[in-house]
Image: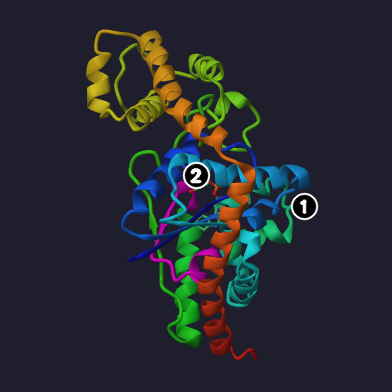
Amino acid sequence: MERIFSGVQPSGVLHIGNYLGAIKNWVNLQNDHQCIFCVVDLHAITVSQDPKELLKKTVEVAKIYLAAGIDPKKSTIFVQSHVKEHAELAWILNTITKIPELERMTQFKDKAKDGKKEASMGLFDYPVLMAADILLYKTVGVPVGEDQVQHIELTRDLAQRFNNKFGEIFTVPKALVRKEGARIMGLDDPIKKMSKSAASQYNYISLTDSPDDVREKIKKAVTDSGKEIVFSQDKPALANLLTIYSLLGGQTIKDIEAKYKDKGYADFKKDLAEVVVEFLEPFQEKYNALDDNEVLEILREGAKKAQVIASQTMSEVKKAVGLIE
Ligand code: TYM
């Protein structure tokens, strides 16, 4: 079976963009792939985190994986910092990464807005650690949202460069990006992606939002001019809401357009809120039923399984590079 690897940072709130862009697709992949899903805590600390919050969030993200339908019997779930080989391989990949390659990364440019004065080396090096995550497991496919594609392109370049220099060790992975849901936009600003670190809570619907919060946020969501409920590139706010409706409600955009042919935004938004609530309620029920200690046990077991593969790859890498084991 082809190997799949992906991860989410335990920072900020997880929102329906993270679910639709990534986690939802993982659930489908686990039936016919060997899947490894990671909570990437070492990535989270590339920007300042409160230590107590970070611990809490790490378990929360694992619970979100499980509540979304990731089955630990089929997939490996673990915490990145439990498998030391991630940091080890990142260091080796650093030695073949060129500074301008990292300077080009749009996420770095976005996060280091203040003229880079406050940006840490960790934030700059973030994509190399991500490449290490992926390459350690000789991953074939990486299911992610659109914002991660540039990082996977870099991963491919590093894998090829390493293989050319030291021998064929790494698999060159490909990004698995779905056409729909790969870029869910902010409810308060449909030109920018829905974001965990958005200043306003009206930007996103969190996976832990209450039904009333969901109704309030969708009511307040920005809309476009005009009255018709139609999917069009020049109506980015409506296109985004239609995408969310379609993916969470399991109806095609065409069917939804037909349903609201003679109706307006108010009806559409009211129903959309209920579609989201109907998705979140069973999800949150499963989430709340999970026991933290059992989840920690799943993560420890997962780390053991991941480490078997990771240490094997590291042995090959060290030998190829000329490091004594
Ligand atoms: P992170 O934690 O920012 O986001 C997790 C996943 O959610 C997707 N995503 C979105 N999809 C659609 N619409 C949005 N508005 C939206 N916002 C986020 C992201 O594309 C991602 O798939 N660098 C990664 C974590 C990572 C990783 C990896 C991923 C570390 N190592 C190895 C894959 C493989 C990140 O920050 O994701």
Q: Amino acid at mark 1?
A: Lys
Image coords of residue 8 (percent x, y): 55, 49
Q: Which residues are magenta?
A: 130-148
Placement of the C terminus among the 4 image quadrants: bottom right
In-front residue for pair 68/232: 68
Nearest to N terminus: mark 2 or mark 1: 2
The kind of residue tagged 2 is: Leu
For residue 304, which numbered disc appears in the image?
Answer: none
Residue drawn at (70%, 60%), measured in percent from left and top? 122
Q: Which residue is mark 2?
A: 66
Q: Position of residue 254 (x, y in %)?
A: 23, 26
Residue occupying the point 48% across, 37% down = 17
Quadrant of residue 175 in the image? bottom left
Looking at the picture, does residue 267 appear above or below residue 174? above
Q: Is residue 191 visible?
A: no
Instruction: Give SS at disc 2.
Output: helix
Marks 2 and 1, how far apart at CA? 39 Å
Q: Nearer the viewer, mark 2 or mark 1?
A: 2
Report which residue position mark 1 lands on. 117
Residue 67 x/y as whole percent? 49, 39
Report helix, strand or loop for mark 1. Answer: loop
Task: Note whether 220 is above or below 132 in the view shown.
Answer: above
Reply yes or no: does residue 90 show up in magenta.
Answer: no
Residue 131 covered by magenta stretch = yes
Q: Residue at x 31, y 27 (%)?
A: 232
Tell me: is circle 2 under 8 Å from ligand 1.
no
Vertical relation: 294 (above or below) 81: above
Q: Is residue 81 above or below residue 184?
A: below
* Number of other residues with Cα within 10 Å of mark 1, as a class: few under 14, some 14 to 19, many 20 or more: few
